[in-house]
Image: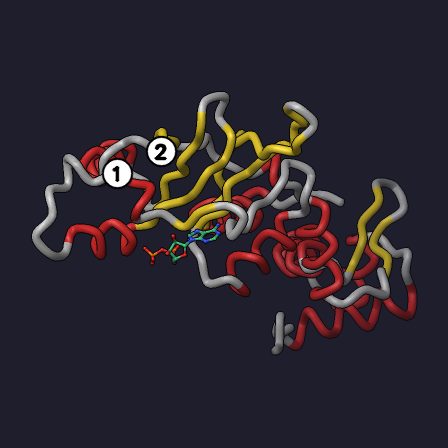
Amino acid sequence: MTVIDLTVRQSNILEIVKQAGPITGKDIADKLGLSRAALRSDLAVLTMSGLLGARPRVGYYYTHKTPSDYIATILGNIQISDAHSLPVVIRENCSVYNAIVTMFTEDVSTIMIVSEGGFLEGVVSRKDLLKASMGDRNLTELPVKVAMTRMPNIIVTTPDEPVLDAAKKLLNHQVDALPVVKVVVVDKTEKLQVVGRFTKTNITRLFVQLADTGYSI
Ligand code: ADP
């Protein structure tokens, strides 16, 4: 996959910096016979993509990194705790009807089912609830636990996991959301306390945020 296509001018700048770096923006502009202002956006692209580094009073230098190294480093450094949302949870005795209402009112596509103390019992998705709604059943009487995917088959993430690893879990397991959990020991057994949710929307938001504001490593 080609991550970045450089223009002729950007390739020329890269060559100059490879040969003469560290070099100031003004010196690069002089070598190309252009103004410093004319180069501003090209230099921004080259530094944002990680091909060039920039240090005040030193100038631009070649990083010996490819853009994909740079992107992997950035994503590997962002943790779930920087990107997750608050969890939307219901208790296991909640009805399928109320789970559907919660999905609408909270505007989420996955709900986590917890026991007392906020410990993970299961997750229920839109399609789980659609499936449970087919047929002639009274949804106000039907408990959500009959429709949910239950522990220990839940794929989870933790606050300190890199978002890149969690994103791979979403893809590999073909799910839209992961409960963010903290492991706590209760009566000598490990339990997963739900502290957040990490969804494809969080990744989309992060993606746009990285493009808009950048992220330094
Ligand atoms: P939908 O089925 O509405 O498209 P998902 O693709 O997220 O939503 O869910 C697919 C199936 O996987 C559902 O049966 C759901 O209960 C289950 N599921 C959702 N999230 C997880 C998860 N984090 N771990 C395990 N199973 C999950």
Q: Amino acid at mark 1?
A: Pro
Front residue of 54/180: it is 180
Question: In the image, is residue 104 above or below residue 171?
Answer: above
Q: Amino acid at mark 2?
A: Glu
Front residue of 133/165: it is 133
Lateral position of residue 38 relative to residue 150, left or right? right
Residue at 54% x, 48% y: name it: 152
Lateral position of residue 196 relative to residue 67, left or right? left
Front residue of 137/123: it is 137
Spatial separation of the CA atoms under disc 2 and disc 1: 7 Å
Residue 185 in view in this figure: yes
Residue 205 in view in this figure: no
**Residue on which disc 2 sits:** 92
Extreme residue in the left direction: 136
Looking at the rendered image, the quarter that the C terminus falls into is: top right
- Disc 2 Cβ-to-ligand 1 distance below 8 Å: no
Looking at the rendered image, the quarter that the N terminus falls into is: bottom right
Q: Secondary structure at mark 2?
A: loop
Question: In the image, is residue 89 above or below residue 16?
Answer: above
**Residue on which disc 1 sits:** 143
Q: Quadrant of residue 2?
A: bottom right
Q: Are marks 2 and 1 in contact (CB under 8 Å)?
A: yes
Residue at 21% x, 53% y: name it: 130
Q: Quadrant of residue 48?
A: bottom right
Q: Quadrant of residue 65?
A: bottom right
Q: Secondary structure at mark 1?
A: loop
Lateral position of residue 152 relative to residue 59, left or right? left
